[in-house]
Every structure is written in structure tokens, then in C-alpha cells.
Image (cartoon, coloured by chain):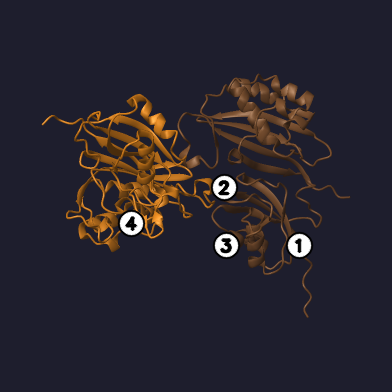
Chain colours: A orange, B brown
């Protein structure tokens, strides 16, 4: 029996429209396996590379959440030259997932543990008209938003804080302290975007931040509501959790690994 | 029995994302009525205005084709002030249809017969990357398009011609002569759009025009192929029929009615 070459660890960057997926993470329901991004990618990798493969991603995006730069890893015996791999995978993927890059990674590369920071964008479609063709990619807000007040509120989120007030209950994390490196508002009318860069996010944290800033933009909360929710850790002082379709995972940064 | 007020004819302008509709025209399949734009609007009008209503539209757009300015007409006894009607209808419509305007029309207004000209736009997404969130609103072309050659081809379509070469067989029209007032190419990278204004269009004519211009843009046909297809009336000299999802009905113009 010919010996298999040692498996190689790969790092893959992926974009997807999350509308028709039950989120990133593989899930089985009574009727069978649900359609998930990880499941679709894994099945395609197995077909293309003709070996058992397990894929794991940096962020477990929820159903309806989109990505422009999700990062995932898998191990496989090399069967296709690395420069042809992305195209080989893409040619067999459905049209709502797109592999942007496949690269050889160090043997211990871990997309979750080695992530330094991530950027999310929450897209609000802010006019009286319906978004129509963008309705699966944005959240529609009819009320005109005060983006100045929102920018003020956004700036209060930067820094290292206990974000318990911005986390859904039962988040299952021992610490709720996170660092937000940047939080700002971009206006590209009729869209208003909330951009957040952080070292990690609690469950639904970006959607709660977006919901809080939207309440500020509508004048229902003042920008200082952010300080109150941060200092009290009380979820009820922050705004509502906005729906998943406006949320985009944009990129995940990894530093060059330092040799042990 | 109280006498009903005389029915009023209304003109309605409608936008929709055609992705999840079996086209504009009402259709019944063995399993029941299919989801059509006209059917959804008619059912909503009946609920809002509480009377039997029949709606008819200017253009029978195919399944997957979108509209920003479809025009339709219906007769109804006034039950709601005209200025509140659009909002009342929209509040009960699904999120992929949007009533832009409802206006009182003259008693004999006919959206089909009185249309003077219409504008269609065919959206081509022209990069190596997949369109992802726009994939239901554009046609994806990987090959880089020569928009100069396309513009040359487009200009040859303007004027009054026999468009038999640009019509699907069995179009069911006695005359295939139509007038194209304008046909040009707009570049909004990564999108390339084909814009056509005409007094009327044969079945699939805009999608065949787009398919011909795309072949020219790819260098598979020269711009003079347009002249050949026009003069021969031979469908095989034009390009393929592009898929419906790139096609947008933009507006329909009506002249002010001249008093008899």
C-alpha cells in the first residue's frame, strides 16, 4: 500500500450570501442535515479532494448573516496544486458561496485561536422606499436616522469594556470583557452602515450594538445610553437585537505567527 | 339598497423583485394558483378595498424579471381617499413588491394601448468574482466585455426595423416591426448595463438584444452582426437569449390623453 503524503493544513477565505443558509455551523434537524455554509463547503471539498475532510471556521455566523471574508481551515493530503484549488472548489459550489482564496497554512494554524481582530458591518437601508433587491442584505429603517448622534454613540463603545449589557443572555462565555478597536458610522445614502472592529464578540453583540445605535439615530435613546448600558451591564439599557440580514462579517486579521 | 358610487379607474405604478414570482401574469398550475405579481397585487387590492377587482398590467414580465416602474390599471368604487391608498396597499404587500404611486385615471385609460414607450435595462455583472448578494438581479459574465464594440452594436439597433431576428419563435404577433428610440451601453463597474427604449418589444426581444451585445462584447460577434440579423430576420444570426434575472423594466411613458 502506497503511503499517503503527510496532510497539509489549508486556510480558506470565503464570501457568502447567508440568506438561504441555516448559518455557518453544521446542523442536523429531524428531517436530515440542514443547508449550512460549512456543510456545503465541506461536502464540496470532499468531492474535489476525494478524501474525508473536516472544515472549521473562525466565526459561527447565524442564519441570514453574510460574509465577505470568513476564514476557515482544513487538513488534506495534497491532490491538486495549490494555485488551482480555489477555482476547482468554486466550479462546484452553489452560486451563494464563493471561495476567495486557498492558501497553505502552518500545521497548527487555528482560525479561531489565532484571530487578532475582526470587522463586522451592519447595513441599514434608510429610506421610506423598500429595499426590494437588497432586502436580504440590509435592514430597512423607515425613520430618518441622525447619523451625527449615532457617531457619538459609536465612539463611546471603543476601548476595553465589559460588554455584558450588549450580549444576549445565556451567551455561555466566562468573561464578557472585550476590546473594540474601532466603531464608526458610514453614510452611503440610502444606506447607513455601522462598522465595528474588535478582538472578539459576544453572542449577538454586533446586532445589539447596531440596535442601540439605531435607537440613538431615531432619537429614542441619547448617545449616553451606551455609557449606561456599558457601566450597568444591563441588557435592557441597550437597544433591540436587529435582524440578521443586515450583518456582514467583513474580514478577520491574523498576525504572522511568531516562532515558539 | 344604497347605490354604489360609480367605479373609478385607477393607474398604479409598481416596483418588484421578480425573483420569487412566476412572472407578472396570473397563472394557475395543477397544484393551485402560482405566485404572480398581478395575483399578489390583485388579492391585496381586494382585501384593502373590499370589493371584486381585476388588475391588468402594461407588460407581462416573465418569471425572474424585475420592475422599477410597471404600470397597471383597475376599476374600483372609491373606499379610501386617493392620498392614503398607496400606503394602505403597501402595508399589506409582501416585501418584494412596492406600490410607488396610485392615481385616478381617465375612465378609458388602458396601460397597454396607451403606452407610448418603455425603457428596459439589462444588468451584466462583469468580473471574475461572483455577484453573491446581487445574483438574483444581474447576469454574471466572467469574460471582460469590450463596451466600445457593444456601444457600436447598440447604436445599430435604433430606428424602425423588422425585429424578427430578435424575437423568439412563436411570438404570436402579426407584425415584427418596432421602433427603438434609444439603445446604449452604460458602464458602472463591475456592472455593464444595456439600456433600450422602444415603442414595443417582441417576446424575449430585450434578452436577445442583450445576448447579441454580450457576444459582441466578448468578441465572438462583430458589431455588424446586428445589421445582418436585422436585414435577414434570421434568429440564428443574433446572440442567445440571456437569462431573466438581469432584466429590469424601468419605466413606461404615457402621453397626456388628447380629448376626442
Q: Which residue is mark 1?
A: B8
Parent chain of label 1: B
Q: Residue B81: x percent and y percent?
A: 66, 64
Which quarter of the rendering shows the C terminus of chain A? top left
Of circles 4 and 1, the one toward us is 1
Question: Which residue bears the numbered disc 4?
Answer: A222
Q: CA distance from mark 1 to mark 3?
A: 22 Å
Q: Mark 3: which secondary structure?
A: loop
Label 3 neighbour load within 10 Å: few <14, some 14-19, many 20+: few
Q: Are marks 2 and 4 in contact (CB under 8 Å)?
A: no
| Left or right of A194 in this view: B185 | right
Residue visible at 78% across and 51% down?
Answer: B110
Q: Earlier in the sequence, mark 3 or mark 2?
A: 2
In the image, which is nearer the foreground, mark 3 or mark 2? 2
1 or 3: mark nearer the eye: 3
Whether residue A137 sits left or right of residue B155 in the image: it is left
Question: Is B47 drawn above or below residue B112 in the view shown?
Answer: below
Residue carrying label 3? B92
In the rendered view, does B206 fall on the left or right side of B4? left
Foreground pick, A44 / B15: A44
Secondary structure under tag 1 reads: strand
Farthest residue, direction left = A260
Disc 1 crowd, CA 10 A, few/some/many (<14, 14-19, 20+) = some
Which residue has dot 2 on it? B19
Task: Give neighbour class at mark 2: few <14, some 14-19, many 20+ (Cα, 10 Å).
Answer: some
Q: In the rendered view, would you say A130 is above or below A97? A: below
Q: How far across and how far down the image is residue A150, in percent?
A: 36, 49
User: If the image is split into quadrants, where does the N terminus of chain A sit?
Assistant: top left
| Dot 3 and dot 2 residues touching (CB under 8 Å) | no
Q: CA distance from mark 3 to mark 2?
A: 19 Å
Amino acid at each position: 500500500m502506497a503511503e499517503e503524503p503527510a496532510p497539509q493544513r489549508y486556510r480558506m477565505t470565503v464570501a457568502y450570501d447567508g440568506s438561504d443558509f441555516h448559518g455557518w455551523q453544521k446542523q442536523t434537524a429531524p428531517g436530515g442535515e440542514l443547508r449550512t455554509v460549512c456543510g456545503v463547503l465541506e461536502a464540496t471539498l470532499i468531492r474535489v479532494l476525494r478524501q474525508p475532510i473536516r472544515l472549521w471556521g473562525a466565526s459561527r455566523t447565524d442564519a441570514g448573516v453574510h460574509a465577505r471574508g470568513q476564514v476557515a481551515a482544513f487538513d488534506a493530503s495534497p491532490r491538486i496544486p495549490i494555485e488551482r484549488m480555489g477555482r476547482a472548489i468554486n466550479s462546484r459550489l452553489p452560486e451563494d458561496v464563493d471561495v476567495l482564496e486557498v492558501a497553505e497554512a502552518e500545521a497548527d494554524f487555528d482560525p479561531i485561536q489565532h484571530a487578532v481582530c475582526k470587522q463586522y458591518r451592519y447595513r441599514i437601508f434608510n429610506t421610506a422606499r423598500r429595499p426590494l433587491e437588497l432586502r436580504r442584505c440590509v435592514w430597512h429603517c423607515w425613520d430618518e436616522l441622525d447619523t451625527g448622534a449615532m457617531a457619538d454613540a459609536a465612539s463611546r463603545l471603543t476601548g476595553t469594556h465589559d460588554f455584558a449589557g450588549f450580549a444576549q443572555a445565556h451567551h455561555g462565555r466566562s468573561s464578557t470583557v472585550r476590546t473594540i478597536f474601532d466603531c464608526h458610522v458610514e453614510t452611503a445614502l440610502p444606506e447607513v452602515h455601522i462598522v465595528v472592529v474588535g478582538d472578539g464578540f459576544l453572542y449577538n453583540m454586533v446586532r445589539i450594538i447596531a440596535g442601540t445605535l439605531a435607537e440613538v439615530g431615531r432619537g429614542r435613546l441619547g448617545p449616553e445610553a451606551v455609557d449606561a448600558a456599558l457601566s450597568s451591564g444591563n441588557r435592557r439599557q441597550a437597544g433591540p437585537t436587529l435582524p440578521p440580514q443586515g450583518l456582514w462579517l467583513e474580514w478577520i486579521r491574523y498576525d504572522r505567527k511568531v516562532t515558539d
